[in-house]
Every structure is written in C-alpha cells, then in structure tokens.
Image: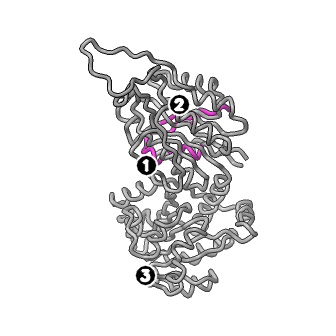
Amino acid sequence: MAKRKASDLRKSVAPRRPAAAPSAGRTEAAREATAAGGAPQLVALGVSGGIAAYKSAEVLRRLQDAGFEVAVIMTANAQKFITPLTLQALSRRSVITGMWDPEAAAQIEHVALARGCALFVIAPATANVIGKMASGVADDFLTTFYLATQAPVLIAPGMNDKMYAHPTVQRNLAHLGEIGVELVPPDAGYLACGDWGPGRMAEPERIAAAALLLVERGARWRSQRVLVTAGPTREPIDRVRFISNRSSGRMGYALAAAARRRGAEVTLVSGPTALPTPRGVARVDVSSAAEMRQQVLRALEPATVVIKAAAVSDYAPRQSLPGKARKRPEGMSLDLAATPDILQEVGQRKGSRLLVGFAAETQDLRQRAQEKLRAKNLDVVVANDVSSDDIGFESERNAVLILGRDGREVALEEAPKTLLAEQILDVLEGYLPS
C-alpha cells in the first residue's frame, strides 16, 4: 500500500483534491475491487446542467474501463445538453431523470441506490448544484440522493471562471470539503463563453482516476473497526459540582464521522457534550473517567484501530459528597486521587491494533508528544498546542503535529476540525493494520 507524503496533504480550507493520473495498475486494481459474489462495484454518476455535460459520456466510459458498473442520475437541465438515451445506451441501465419516474418511485430508488453504491460522482457539478448540496436542499433526485447516500462523494465542478471564483461558490466548496466531499478541481482553459480561466471541468481520465483512489481507500477502511473516544469527563465533587476540562469533543466527533464516511465500523465513547451523534456511528455515553475506562475496555476486543481523542480528567475527588455541599466561608479542600490511565492500559493490551493518542500541551510540544508516544506504547500521537484561545479547546479550528513511531512527522496547518479529521485519517492510512 502506497503511503502518502506530507506534501500530498491538503493544507488549506479548500476541499481535498485527490486527482491523479490513471495507470494500468490502478485500472487492474479496480477490476478486482468487486462486491460480494464477484459483481462489479456500483458507482452513481450525477450529471447536472452545464455545457460540460457532454463530457459525462466519456466519464462514464472511463469509469467502466476502470471496472465499475455505473448508474446515471440526470437533472432536468442536464437533459438539455445530452439525452438520457445516450447515457442509458452506454451504461446499459435506465437513467434516473426525476423523483417521480415510475421505476424510481416503485423502488424508492434514491434509498435503494444509495445503499448499494460505492461512490457518488457528480460531473459536471454546476454552481447551482454545489450551492444546493452545501445548503442541504433536496429538490430533485440528484440532491436527494446526495443526502441519502453514505458513500464517498466526488465532485468535478464545471462553470464560467467568474462563477467559479465567486466568494459564494468558493465558500460552498470549502464547506463541502470540510464535511468530506472530495473535489477534482477544474482546469484552466478556454470556456464555452469564450473567456479563458479556471472553471472548465477536469478531463474524464482525471475524474476516473480520482474516483478509483476513493474506492480503493474505502476498501481499506471498510475492513476496519474503529474505536474513538471524545469529549471531557466529569468527576463529581457532590451531586451538583464536578471537576472537568475545556474539551468540546469536536475533534473526536469529526474523526468518528470521517472514519464512518470512509466505510469503517465506528464506535464512539463520548464524555458529556452537546454534539449530535455522527451519522452511522454507534455512540456510548459516559460521564466519569472510571465509566470511560469501563466502556473502552468493553469495546476494545473487536477494534482494529483505537483513536483516543478524549480529554480524560487526570484527577478526581477521592470521595464524592452526598447531596449538595453547603458553601462555607472558610472555603473547601479537596482530596484528589489520580484517575485510571486509560491510554496506558490500552497500550499494554494493544496487540496488533493501531493505537493513536492525543497530546494537548502548552509548551515543549514535540518533546512531550514524543515522550507520550514512547511511554504509552502508541503507534501515532497527534499533538496540539492549547496555549492559545483561538484554536484547540472550545474552538472549531485546530492545528496539529503528527508523530509516528516509525519517525514520520507531519505538521497540519490551522484548519477546521472537520477538515483536520480527514487529513489525520489520510496520515493514519499508512499505518492501518492489514
């Protein structure tokens, strides 16, 4: 399995760009990437209404050459540029053209197809469709399917260069990238309007190569059972008060969601947080460090990957007072005891699992992260500086330094935690157990 270099990682808020040149080896790999029973994996191809829709026939052919079966979804505007009959003849499947097609309605097809496909490709993706995807609008089959599928999503924008550069379009693309939608960026060249600039949909071979990379990645993650911990713990002083920390749980939740989108089976053991459960993730709620230890050890046996992103309290009152303790003018002293070191215990039981720890530090970041890597028997440690109020705890953004047991080191620049989660998993891909 090829390992990605740090230079390949995305380092901005723009969506990730997995474009690559196709190769015979990759095409052969795709032919072997089949579903149970030997059937080719199914890719859904969405076609929206731009002049580049004429290229969708070639995109379909390239996907077929890579070994995939292709189901086509067309918007009403796309049908003004290329006929459904053309794509039906090439795909040898009925083309879905609307929510109320008799065949689609009979099978609730957006749900049936969403469950069965390995990837959803939209080529071309117009500014209109990108905007609806970013806003959660589902007013036709294509956008409804986008919300229904749990498969990876890849878009290839195609539009006028002024439209592509518009701040609203760029904001929508950035938002889609943060939630895991992949991008094959458009080429620069002469456009249908006569202008020259970025906006022309990428060539079909680039789109097919990017699709193949995503399906191969999904095949690696589908075999993994990922255990993620997130959020703070609360150690009770009495029935009202507790000791805790500033962790919001966002990083752990983003990692759980990203792993699930890649096809992994994910269990999330969460401390107290108001965050919604990521789609498709099994969530177990806990409060104290002792409860988190119990649930982590219970979920450890089937796990192949353990990501300990929770901020577990280091100390807890030796005794929790019954009821509510009255306020005393002279103050109050607490006798604190160390909580269980869950990460170290998991490290002792690690076996062949990939174990990833987090290190939140205010100084000597690299040194302390390396010490934790060795002391806890980790494979990878993700370290972040929490001395600033702008990123880290209670923030939607972060910047991290990733250190591997094998000496690899990757610095990920400040970005939304949803985007960092994808980048962190990109790095972890090189460490996945076979």
Residue extending farthest top: 330
Check the image and report above or below for 237 versus 124.
Answer: above
- Please state which of residues 334 and 195 is positioned toward the viewer in this rendering: 334
Name the disc covering residue 13, or none: 1
In the image, taking residue 268 as reference, residue 345 lies left or right, namely right
> Is 414 a magenta residue?
yes
Q: Which residues are magenta?
A: 400-427
Residue 124 on image: x %, y % = 48, 71
Please check the rendered image and state whether residue 411 is part of the magenta-colored stretch, yes or no. yes
Q: Can you give x and y, in whole percent of width and height, for residue 261 in the image?
A: 55, 55
In the figure, residue 3 lies in which quadrant? Answer: top right
Say which of 54 and 230 sits in front: 230
Q: Is residue 302 above or below residue 222?
A: above
Question: Which structural element holds mark 2?
Answer: helix
Q: Quadrant of residue 113?
A: bottom right
Q: Secondary structure at mark 1?
A: loop
Q: Amino acid at mark 1?
A: Val
Q: Could you tell me which residue is drawn at 46 percent across and 23 percent down?
A: 316
Q: Please tell me the numbered disc located at residue 290.
A: 2
Is residue 418 found left or right of 369 in the rendered image? Answer: left
